[in-house]
Each structure stands twice: as C-alpha cells, then as structure tokens.
C-alpha cells in the first residue's frame, strides 16, 4: 500500500508540474495584460503536435524538442501580434469569444494537417527505464525527468521575476502599467515577450505530455480547464500561487483516481464502481476549488492583496 | 445636541511602508459643514475610503449616528445614510440622467425584487428624481440625455443628485468642484450652501475659495494626520498650515 | 409603430414557417427551426446575465443539459416503471417534466451561483466553466443513465391537446414558449430588478455607494437564467429524443455565449438572431466543407473585432455605447 501511495504521490507531482507550466503562463498573461486567453490550451496542443510529428518524421528527439518549443512560441507570439493585442482594451466577454474562435481554428487546423487519429509518441530508449528514488519504489525515469524539468522551470521563473530587469518590469507592469510606459519602455514588446514565454512553457508541457497521454485534438481544452481550477485556487496573477495550486490539484486528482474506484469496488459491482469512481474523482478538484473559494474567495495567494 | 453625526476615532491605515492615515480622529456635528483640506498625498482619498467602508482600517473605529459601523460594508453604511459622492464621477453612462437618479431613488424605496412593473415610467421614482435634478440645477433639456454624453460639469452635478437621492443623513463629498469652470464652481457652491444646515456634510475640496466661504469648520490633513482644525479664520492664521501649504506650493 | 409592424410580421413569418418549408419541399427546415428556437430560449436566458448583469458565465450549458436530463431520466424511470430513488415516479408528461426541469436547473444554478458569485471578473468566468465541467463529469459517470453515451427518449412527452410527434406541433410549442419567455425577460429587464441589474453591469461601485448589496440581485439573475436554460434543454431533449453529457460540455457553453454576442449583447431579440445566425452558419459552412470550424473560428473573431453590437448592431438596434 505504501509503495502504491508513494508512486501515486509522485504521479500527482508529475501532473502538478505539467499544470504549473500551463498555469504560470496563463496567470502571467492575465496578471500583466489583463487578458483571459482560452487558446492557451491550443499552444499546449501545438507543442505536442510539433514534437510528435517531428519525432515521427526524423526520429530525432532533439529535433522534436526544438520543433515543439519553437512551434508553440512562434504561434504564441503571432497570436499576440495579430489577435490578442487588439483585445487588451476590450472586456472579458470579447476576449473569451475571440479566443474561443481561435480554439476552433487551431483544433480544426490540426485535424486538417495531421488528421483525427491520436498520435502515439515513443520514449527515447534512454528514458524508458525506472529509477529507484526510494529503495523498493521503482519509478519511471521519464516521469522523474518531467518533475525535474518542472521544478527547474519554477526556480528559473522565480529568479527571472524576482531578480532580473525583465522581472522588475513584469512586476511593475502588472500594477503600474502607465508608470512603465512613462519610463519609456516599449510595453508592447514586453507583452509580446511575456506572451512568448507563456507559450513556450505551454509548448514544453505539451511536448512532455506526448509520451504519457495521447497527442490528440482537444487535449488542450481538457487540461486548460484544470489549469483554470489551478489558477483560481492559487490566486490570479500569482506564479507562486500557480505552483502551489498546481501541485495541490495534481496530487488531489491523481490520488482520487488512484484510490476512489478501489474503495467503491468494496461496496458495489466492479464496472459500475470504476465508472462512478472515475467520475467522482474527476469532480474532486472542483469540490476542492469550491472549498478554497468558500474560505478565500481570491485564492490562496492573491497577487495584489 | 450632544452627539456628533459622525465620529471617527484613532484611525490608522498603512499600505506596505506608507502610513496613509495616522491616528486620525474626526467628527461632524448635526447641521455642520466640515471641510477637509490638505496637499496632494495627504491621505484624503484613503480617509474617504475608510469612512465609506471601501478600505478597512488597521485600527480605530467609526461611529455613525451613535452606532459603530466599522465592520459594515459600503452598501450597509450607505443604507444607514452615510452617503458619498465621487471625485471621479461614477454613473451609469449608458443610461439617461433621469434614469440614473431614478435608480438611486428606487434603491431607497424598499427592496428591488420587483420583476414585473416598468420602472422607467413609474411616477413614484420619476417624480422625486426630477425634483432632485431641479434642485441641483441640471437643465430639463438634458434629463433625457445619455449620461456618457453629458459635459464634465453636468456629470459632477448629477453625481451630487445621485448622492442626494440616496437619502443621506451625512454627505461625504469628494472634491465636488474638481474640474469645474468658474461659473460652474460658483453654481455648485450655491447648491451646497442651500443644502447646508439641512444635511451635515464632510467636504473634501481643493477650491479654497469655496471652502473658506462655505465651511463651518476646516480640518487640515498632512501625511495622514490632522495638523489643525478650526474656523476659517483660525486655519488661515495657523503657522503649521501655512508651512504645509507653502512647502507644497513652492516645492 | 413601424417596429411593432415588423415584429408582428416576423412573428407571423415564424408561425407560418413550417408551411413554407413544406411548400418549397424542405420539410427538414422545421426541425432546424425548432433547434434554433430552443437554443434561442437558452441564449436569451444567458443574455439576461451577460447582457444586463455584465456577469460572464461560461457554464450555462450545464443548466441546459440538466433540463434535458430531467426529461431523459424521468422517461427512463417511466419506461422501466421503477421510481427514481425509490419514491419519485417516472413521467412522460410534458406538464410534469418541463416545470421539474426548470426547478432542477434553478436549484443547480442557485448552488453554483452562490459560490461563483463570491468572485468576479475573470475568476467568475473560470469558475462557472469549472463547475459546469464538474456537472459534465457527474453525468459521464452515471452508468445507469448511459454515462458517456447518453439516454434515448423513445417518444416525445405527451401534452393534452397536442401531438408532439408531429414536427410542426413540436415547433409551435417551442416557438410559443420562446415568445412567452422573451416577453417575461423583457418585463424583468424593464422592472426595478432589471434596473438594479443594469446598474451592476455598468458600475457596481456606484450601486454599493447608493446602498445596494448586489450579491442577492446577481444570484437571482443567475438563477433566472439557469431556469431559462433548463426549459430550453428540456425542449431540446424532447425534440432530439436524446440526451447526453455532450449537451453540457464546455463547447456548448461557448456556443451559447457566441449566440449572445453574435446577435447583439443586451438586446431583446439579439439572442434569437444569434441562435439563428450560428445554427445557420454551421449548416451552411457544414454543407460546404467538413472542416467548417476552421472557418467559423475566424468569423467569430471578426465579429468580436469588427462588428461590435452583433447582428442587432448591424441593423441599427445595438445597445448604445460611448
């Protein structure tokens, strides 16, 4: 039981860091530019497809990595330049609608280019093994790598935001847009840059997700909604909140999926228990969100308290 | 009368390292027009926020009509008659002037969970609204104009009408003259003079001419503290006040 | 006066539409029109919240789906002859299922709204979406009612005096309810309650300053719009004779918002035009290419960027903006 528990806990952390990569970009973009971008999930999908298609075509993992990251970042920056830039001054309703249109466009676009069949991505041989992090608990090396990458990104973001000039502008830009402008800094460039960074992180999450989950159209929206839960729980605009929220949601979701169906099997027939268990565990994070909201309507780490 | 309408005691508010309100006490008595002046950054806006409930003080309490309202919401304080106007007008820009005031009248005519009868043609709302528009001097030709299309002066006047419609037992007026031309300022001064004595008022204002001609009492705020309080003549003669204002004017 | 004439003509046209469809040999049009009418009821309900209260809910397909499932689940228990939870008998009577659908949707809206309205702005959008997703997953897991696959309602509900198996009668019933609901909504918008809601949309700070605690008003608006969506869903379930979790998916919530915007936010007839416009676009583009969403996306984008006020705005009836 405890081995299973440790494994599920690690799985939860792994899902958590993936969610963090998405939530960090989403929350930065919202915190700084005041834009809600539904198409953030599309960038995740584009990262995944970019990598998967390149890996299949060339067989090179490094090329796949580069392709996934650059596809997401380039599409993201183009999205900012062409569409989102026109939405900064609009209300949330317009932003939701416009980016909803983008989702339809990207999902159908990928279907036209690659087809409806999900892609399966094989792992590079070096990463297929397991590592005994704790003696007696073998754990897939690839998932450990994801956790490590996610935590490294979190640390990098912390340094970037707290200790660099760009980070200073980001922090200032979130609260004093006019002041930053008055200092003669091209805020448009800053916005494109931040948006590109968010897109890059989403693409990174997407390409790492490939070998674990199927690469398919619609994958972006599934995880986007979970990311919204993360952002609401963590507090909008807060990267720290995004990290804690992501881990909380990742672990809760994984634990529920891991153990609820088993518990239900002891009181009902197996197939019904599995179906009900899956649905109850899917609902779990939303119940968690409701509970957090009851206590702290602005999330655990509100950015501008 | 033995009791002030509004009594704020020992208000203290800090934002990060900045002390915006520093152990401030303040009162307004029945019938009184109490003016609050101070250089920019003196904490006037914070004080209004504290009194109306938009900002919670770190310490201190606020008594209104003898009752502690420190923990009440903005809306709950307003319902008791602690009503403000905004320096930057807050109106329903898509609606007409008349509809704006009628809505304010409506919110003081019982609850608004009434789903069927047309509010737009209800004389119980329109008659008092029109009376108020006349009282503040907005020309009848403008009543049917969309508020977003009114001039700044007209919007300031409407802002006052909104506050009056909310059955105030104390008016907190945040720079009612801000941005007004000379003639408009004079008209506003006369409107306030006509109200004076009937409704107690706490007025924050930069227009010194208006302040000195209207106020029964003036309090001077500097760095979140009240450095002086007294009649117009006493304030004019106060050396601390002169120093604070001279520093501002020349610095 | 002219507007009244136009409205009467439009209504007459809508009533006579099935005959026209038969006459030109396109009887399927009546079915499409029925769907448009059902969606228009839902979009008009959402417009009360978005257009008049400024509350952008991204989860209203949940109430639409709940209304549909009330019809489906009551049918299932009617069919099996087993009471729901052991004491609620199943039903195939529209006069039972419709009010119950509205009640259930209203109760769900009350619970979800009470929580969601603790937030505002972009958090409100995310939370309404997330709660709708929660309801979606609940129904995916209910194997008893078909889970992912949904439920078939073999026969439309019965109403005294009507035969809903007849496509025209089904259409007229939905049209009648749409007209009634639009009239109710118009009264609500013009009432004291509607004025407060409009105040919340335009300037919530002003509303607090004149003593209005806005939460209860927003919640009632949320519940009313949920009830309307429940009604629409129940009708749609009858029309399609099928319910599934897909009806409450996030895409459906997005489409309801699209209808509101496309038609013209905050206008009485905008949601109807929006429903007709979106369904029409889907059928037209769908007839041209399998990949119609690829073109629908940019069209939506263009509407948002360049056609503020939507179709009603283009007709000169948009809400006045500064």
Image (tube, coloured by chain):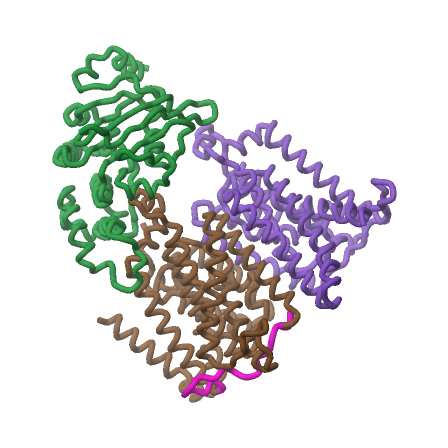
Q: Nearer the viewer, residue C86 or C117?
A: C86
- From where the camera sits, is residue B94 visible? yes
The brown chain is C
Q: Is residue B146 above or below residue B6?
A: below
> Quick check: C78 left or right of C32?
right
> Quick check: A236 left or right of B151?
right
- Which residue is painted at 48% across and 77% down in the image? C32
The location of residue A214, given as percent across then percent down, is 73, 58
The span shown in magenta is: C145-165
Q: Is residue B188 above or below residue A30?
A: above
- From where the camera sits, is residue B96 visible? no
Q: Nearer the viewer, residue A71 or A122?
A: A122
- Which residue is painted at 72% across and 66% down in the image? A268
- Which residue is painted at 53% across and 70% down in the image? C285
The location of residue B74, given as percent across then percent down, is 35, 40
- Is C156 covered by the magenta stretch? yes
- Is A163 covered by the magenta stretch? no
The location of residue A62, given as percent across then percent down, is 78, 45
Colour representing chain B = green
Colour representing chain A = purple
> Quick check: A220 left or right of B195?
right
Q: Which secondary structure dominates the residues rendered in magenta?
A: loop
The location of residue A4, given as percent across then percent down, is 80, 50
Q: Is residue A226 above or below residue A191?
A: below
Residue at far top of view:
B239
Q: Nearer the viewer, residue C80 or A130?
A: C80
Q: Is residue B44 above or below residue A101?
A: above
């Amino acid at each position: 039981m405890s081995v299973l528990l440790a494994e599920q806990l690690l799985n939860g952390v792994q899902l958590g860091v993936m969610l963090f990569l998405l939530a960090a970009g989403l929350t930065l973009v919202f915190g700084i530019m005041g834009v809600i971008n539904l198409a953030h999930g599309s960038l995740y999908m584009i990262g995944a497809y970019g990598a998967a298609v390149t890996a299949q075509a060339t067989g090179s993992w490094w090329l796949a990595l580069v392709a996934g990251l650059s596809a997401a970042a380039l599409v993201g920056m183009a999205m900012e330049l062409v569409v989102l830039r026109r939405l900064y001054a609009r209300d949330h309703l317009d932003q939701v609608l416009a980016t909803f249109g983008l989702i339809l466009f990207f999902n159908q676009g990928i279907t036209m280019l690659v087809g409806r069949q999900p892609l399966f991505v094989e792992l590079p041989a070096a990463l297929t093994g397991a590592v005994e992090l704790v003696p007696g608990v073998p754990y897939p090396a690839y998932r450990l790598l994801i956790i490590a990458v996610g935590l490294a990104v979190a640390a990098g973001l912390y340094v970037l935001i707290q200790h660099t000039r760009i980070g200073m502008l980001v922090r200032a830009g979130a609260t004093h847009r006019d002041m930053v402008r008055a200092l003669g800094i091209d805020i448009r460039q800053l916005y494109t840059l931040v948006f590109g960074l968010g897109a890059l992180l989403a693409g990174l999450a997407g390409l790492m997700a490939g070998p674990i989950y199927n690469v398919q159209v619609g994958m972006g929206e599934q995880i986007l909604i979970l990311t919204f839960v993360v952002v609401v729980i963590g507090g909008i605009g807060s990267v720290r909140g995004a990290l804690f929220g992501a881990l909380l949601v990742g672990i809760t979701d994984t634990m529920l999926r891991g153990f609820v169906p088993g518990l239900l099997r002891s009181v009902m027939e197996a197939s019904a228990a599995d179906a009900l268990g899956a649905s109850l565990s899917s609902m779990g994070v939303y119940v968690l969100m409701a509970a957090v909201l009851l206590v702290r309507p602005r999330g655990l780490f509100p950015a501008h308290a | 009368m033995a009791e002030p309408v509004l009594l704020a005691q020992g208000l203290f508010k800090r934002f990060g390292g900045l002390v915006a309100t520093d152990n401030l006490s303040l009162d307004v008595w029945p019938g009184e027009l109490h003016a609050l002046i101070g250089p920019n950054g003196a904490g006037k806006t914070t004080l209004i926020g504290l009194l109306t409930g938009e900002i919670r003080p770190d310490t201190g309490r606020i008594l209104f009509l003898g009752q502690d309202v420190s923990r009440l919401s903005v809306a709950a304080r307003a319902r008791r008659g602690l009503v403000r106007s905004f320096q930057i007008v807050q109106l329903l820009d898509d609606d007409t002037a008349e509809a704006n005031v009628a809505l304010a009248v409506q919110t003081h005519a019982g609850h608004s969970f009434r789903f069927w009868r047309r509010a737009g043609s209800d004389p119980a709302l329109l008659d008092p609204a029109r009376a108020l528009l006349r009282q503040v001097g907005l020309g009848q030709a403008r009543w049917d104009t969309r508020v977003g299309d009114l001039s700044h002066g007209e919007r300031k006047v409407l802002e006052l009408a909104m506050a009056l419609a909310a059955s105030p037992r104390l008016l907190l007026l945040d720079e009612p003259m801000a941005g007004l031309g000379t003639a408009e300022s004079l008209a506003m001064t006369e409107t306030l003079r006509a109200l004076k004595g009937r409704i107690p008022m706490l007025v924050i204002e930069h227009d010194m001419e208006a302040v000195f001609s209207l106020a029964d009492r003036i309090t001077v705020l500097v760095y979140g503290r009240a450095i002086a309080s007294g009649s117009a003549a006493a304030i004019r003669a106060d050396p601390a006040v002169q120093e604070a204002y001279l520093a501002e004017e020349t610095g | 006066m002219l507007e009244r004439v136009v409205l009467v003509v439009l209504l007459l046209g809508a009533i006579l539409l099935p005959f026209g469809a038969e006459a030109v040999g396109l009887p399927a049009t009546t079915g499409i029109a029925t769907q448009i009418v059902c969606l228009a009821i839902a979009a008009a309900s959402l417009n009360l919240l978005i257009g008049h209260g400024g509350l952008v809910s991204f989860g209203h397909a949940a109430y639409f789906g709940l209304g549909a499932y009330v019809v489906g689940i009551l049918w299932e228990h009617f069919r099996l002859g087993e009471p729901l939870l052991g004491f609620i008998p199943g039903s195939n009577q529209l006069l039972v299922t419709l009010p119950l659908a509205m009640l259930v949707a209203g109760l769900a809206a009350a619970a979800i709204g009470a929580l969601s309205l603790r937030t505002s702005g972009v958090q409100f959008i995310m939370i309404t979406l997330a709660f709708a997703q929660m309801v979606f997953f609940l129904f995916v897991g209910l194997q008893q009612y078909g889970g992912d696959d949904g439920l078939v309602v073999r026969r439309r509900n019965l109403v005294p005096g009507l035969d809903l198996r007849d496509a025209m009668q089904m259409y007229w019933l939905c049209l009648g309810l749409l007209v009634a609901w639009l009239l109710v909504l118009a009264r609500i918008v013009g009432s004291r309650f509607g004025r407060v809601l409009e105040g919340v949309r335009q300037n919530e700070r002003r509303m607090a300053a004149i003593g209005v605690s806005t939460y209860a008003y927003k919640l009632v608006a949320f519940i009313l719009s949920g009830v309307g969506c429940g009604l629409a869903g129940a009708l749609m379930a009858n029309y399609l004779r099928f319910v599934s979790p897909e009806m409450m998916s996030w895409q459906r919530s997005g489409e309801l918002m699209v209808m509101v915007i496309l038609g013209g936010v905050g206008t009485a007839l905008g949601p109807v035009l929006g429903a007709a416009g979106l369904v029409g676009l889907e059928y037209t583009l769908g007839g041209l290419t399998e990949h119609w969403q690829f073109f629908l996306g940019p069209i939506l984008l263009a509407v948002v960027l360049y056609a503020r006020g939507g179709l009603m705005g283009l007709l000169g009836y948009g809400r006045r903006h500064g």
